[in-house]
């Protein structure tokens, strides 16, 4: 099934399955790469790992240079985390305010 035919949930499940089954076992030191991004073409399983933990753009660029057809079917995941980003805030102790 082509990536464009997948629901959002199926797309995420496929990306996570590729990561868990094929990519994570190939990462030499997952602790050293913790918080680095992995970008995955969910149709072919091709992937790239980001050079640092801040942004995934370098890995996306390298993947698209190798596999331009991957555009529109890339799943992003962080090593050591089931999600690539989180949305929301954090609770501050009572009486504290943000600067």
Image (tube, rainbow, N blue to C red):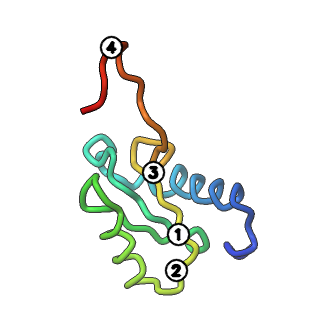
Could you tell me residue 17's position as x and y percent? 60, 53
**What crowding class fits label 4: few (fewer than 14 Cα within 10 Å), some (14-19), or many (20 or more)?**
few
In the rendered structure, are the residues bearing label 1 and label 2 in contact, judged by CB atoms less than 8 Å apart? yes
**What crowding class fits label 2: few (fewer than 14 Cα within 10 Å), some (14-19), or many (20 or more)?**
few
> Which residue is labeled 4 in the image?
95
Tell me how far mark 3 sits from mark 1, CA to CA.
Answer: 12 Å
> Which residue is labeled 1 in the image?
74
Of the numbered discs 4 and 1, the one sitting upstream in the chain is 1
Q: What residue lies at 44% left-to-right and 42% top-to-bottom?
A: 81
Q: What residue lies at 30% left-to-right and 40% top-to-bottom?
A: 31
Which disc, if any, is residue 57?
none
Front: mark 4 or 1 = 4
Tell me how far mark 4 sits from mark 1, CA to CA.
Answer: 43 Å
Q: Locate residue 38 relative to residue 19 in the image: left or right.
A: left
In the rendered structure, are the residues bearing label 4 and label 3 in contact, judged by CB atoms less than 8 Å apart? no
Of the numbered discs 4 and 2, the one sitting upstream in the chain is 2
Front: mark 4 or 3 = 4
**What crowding class fits label 1: few (fewer than 14 Cα within 10 Å), some (14-19), or many (20 or more)?**
many
């Amino acid at each position: 099934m082509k990536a464009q035919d997948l629901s959002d949930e199926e797309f995420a499940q496929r990306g996570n399955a590729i990561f868990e089954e094929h990519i994570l076992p190939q990462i030499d030191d997952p602790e050293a790469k913790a918080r680095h991004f992995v970008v995955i073409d969910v149709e072919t399983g091709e992937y790239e790992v980001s050079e640092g933990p801040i942004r995934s753009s370098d890995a996306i660029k390298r993947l698209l240079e190798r596999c331009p057809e991957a555009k529109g079917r890339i799943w992003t995941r962080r090593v050591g985390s089931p999600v690539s980003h989180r949305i929301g805030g954090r609770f501050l102790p009572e009486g504290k305010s943000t600067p």
